[in-house]
Amino acid sequence: DKPLALVGKGVTFDSGGINIKPSNGLTDMHQDMSGGASVIHAMSAIARLKLPINILGFVPAVENMPSGSSYRPGDILKSYSGKTIEVLNTDAEGRIILADAISYAKTKNPALIFDVATLTGAALAALGQRASALFTKNDKLTNFLSTTAEKSGDYAWPMPLWDEYEEEIKGTFGDVANLGKTPYGGAITGAMFLWQFAKPNLWA
């Protein structure tokens, strides 16, 4: 069978980079690799249980710190896919590394790309700490993942990913921008950014 691709954000520490975070939020930023840790542990559990699943794990791992070689607001990055990314804020780094990991996962012809990430605090603002934000363009997959999440007690709530939101992440100088054009709906624009690299694959 075609493989299932698990992609997990692995930012081992996120200071925000040049757009440095406020000091009261920094002490938890070693947890920004939770998506990557989830993928590693899922792969480990599947291997230990000897489950007959064709599955691939991808963990882009970085540290986001200010330094003389840091990327800067205004930089234009060429992604693995060939699309260019306009950096509007260096603290929106997770989606940039996930874009490359998702693009690389696509080369393995997966049946589904499933990415897990502490992508943005905007998801917490929308849903609090009791549920994860769930994004996909496929209704059947939305229903399956929502039901499975509820059964496991690790809730996930579907959020919109309408085509109209694509306008929010179009770049001025690059193909896409790593931040939305308004301060609203940050979780949605983060997901819409990732969709630009996942499409047309089945993705959540």
Image (tube, rainbow, N blue to C red):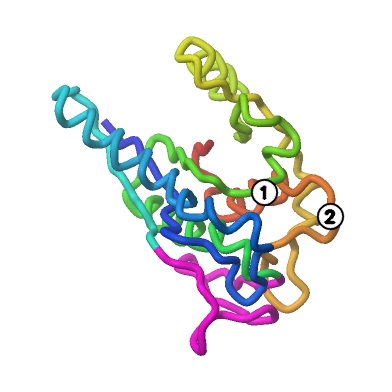
**Occupied quadrant, residue 72:** bottom right
Q: Is residue 112 above or below residue 171?
A: above
- If you read the primary sequence from the N terminus, does the residue marked by circle 1 or circle 2 appear first? 2
Which span is picked out in magenta? 62-88
Quadrant of the rendered image containing residue 126: top right
Considering depth in this image, is 196 or 132 the residue closer to the camera?
132
Percent coordinates x, y for residue 169 in the rendering: 74, 59
Label disc, if present, on residue 183 of the rendered structure = 2
Name the secondary structure under disc 2: loop
Q: Which secondary structure class fits the magenta region best?
A: loop
Q: Left of 196 or right of it: where is 29?
A: left
Circle 1: element type? helix
- Marker count (numbered): 2
> Which disc is residue 30 wearing?
none
How far across and down, in percent of the image, does residue 178 sit? 66, 63
Residue sitting at 34 percent across and 35 percent down? 4
The residue that mark 1 highlights is 192
